[in-house]
Amino acid sequence: MLPRTFLHIPRVGPVTEARLWARGIRSWDDLLAAGTGVLPRSAARSASACLEASRRALAEGRPGFFAGRLPPAEHWRLFPHFRARTAYLDIETTGLDAESGHVTTAALYDGRRLRWYVHGENLDDFAADVARYDVLVTYNGRCFDLPFLERSMGLRLGQAHIDLRCVLGALGFRGGLKGCERALGVRRDGLDGVDGWTAVRLWAAWRRSGSRRALETLIAYNAADTVNLERLMVAAYNLRLGATPFAGETPLEAPAPPPPPFAPDRGVLRALGAPAA
């Protein structure tokens, strides 16, 4: 999709991009062959240089070039080109304030391997592991996960970032991560109805009682949040692609999710007053 994208050219908006597509100009090569005179004068001056820089960035595998020039709702366009170097990320915390709280668990999934991290056990490994990836996918990570990690752990997360809250919001999906999952038919066995507040209480139960079942239930919840991001990312990409002239292309597929690291404990959830499906 990136070689068909013009939205990252300075002063080119969605209306101009749609007009170019309608005129049969559907790739960077098409635009260079047609000449930048087909663009509004304000955009024509920088278009050639931008497209040449775009070619280099794509060939050199630099997703940040495009992420820095596209609106957050359009970052879905990066996905197929950098999927092999993408990680899905979600964290759980003691609360919303990174100054007074901390990360309790975190999970990373790259479509092949699921890793999870626990405060006081292996959370220090997270920084080196996340640095291996060039693109991060989150839900609401722009506002919460990434700033929280940077403030509470001192990390510098400079990767290109696809925030599915922005991408799915542009499609009309609301209601948080769980609402988007329900709308797109994504289920989480044994964890339906469990939410972020339950995650805070699971951590408190683990710290208070040392119940490994509470910790494993928290990890199972965090892992489900993370693994399901891939299915939402693929669904969002296919839906957004379907609204372009390239809708006839073969849709992306989401591989089968990995087995959950732990089964949520129904007794622990019931004791907290949470649903135990």
Image (tube, helix red, strand yellow):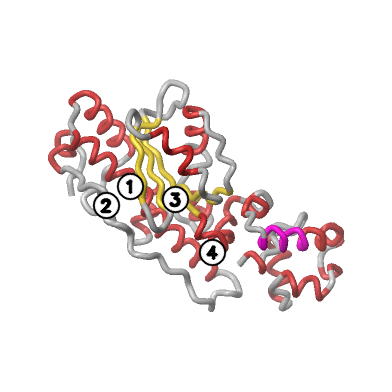
Q: Which residue is mark 3?
A: 88
Q: Which residues are magenta?
A: 51-59
Q: Which residue is mark 1?
A: 223
Asked if 215 appears above or below 252 in the picture, the reply is above
- Secondary structure type for disc 1: helix
- Secondary structure type for disc 2: loop
Check disc 1 and give the amino acid type: Ala
Check disc 2 and give the amino acid type: Pro
Residue 93, position in %: x, y?
37, 32
Reading the chain from its start, which is encountered first: label 1 or label 4? 4
Which residue is nearer to you in this view: 134 or 241? 134
- Secondary structure type for disc 4: helix
The reply, left or right, for residue 203 in relation to residue 49 is: left
Reading the chain from its start, which is encountered first: label 3 or label 2? 3
Asked if 40 appears above or below 260 in the picture, the reply is below
Residue 6, position in %: x, y?
71, 63
Q: Which residue is mark 4?
A: 80
The reply, left or right, for residue 274 in relation to residue 109 is: left
Check disc 3 and give the amino acid type: Tyr
Reading the chain from its start, which is encountered first: label 3 or label 4? 4
Q: CA distance from mark 4 to mark 2?
A: 25 Å
Asked if 251 appears above or below 105 in the picture, the reply is below
At label 1, counting other C-alpha atoms closer than 10 Å, the crowd grade (few under 14, some 14-19, many 20 or more) is many
Residue 166, position in %: x, y?
53, 50
Q: CA distance from mark 2 to mark 1?
A: 7 Å
Q: Quadrant of residue 52?
A: bottom right
Q: CA distance from mark 3 to mark 4?
A: 14 Å
Q: Which residue is mark 2?
A: 260
Is residue 53 covered in magenta?
A: yes
CB atoms of marks 2 and 1 within 8 Å: yes
Reading the chain from its start, which is encountered first: label 2 or label 1? 1
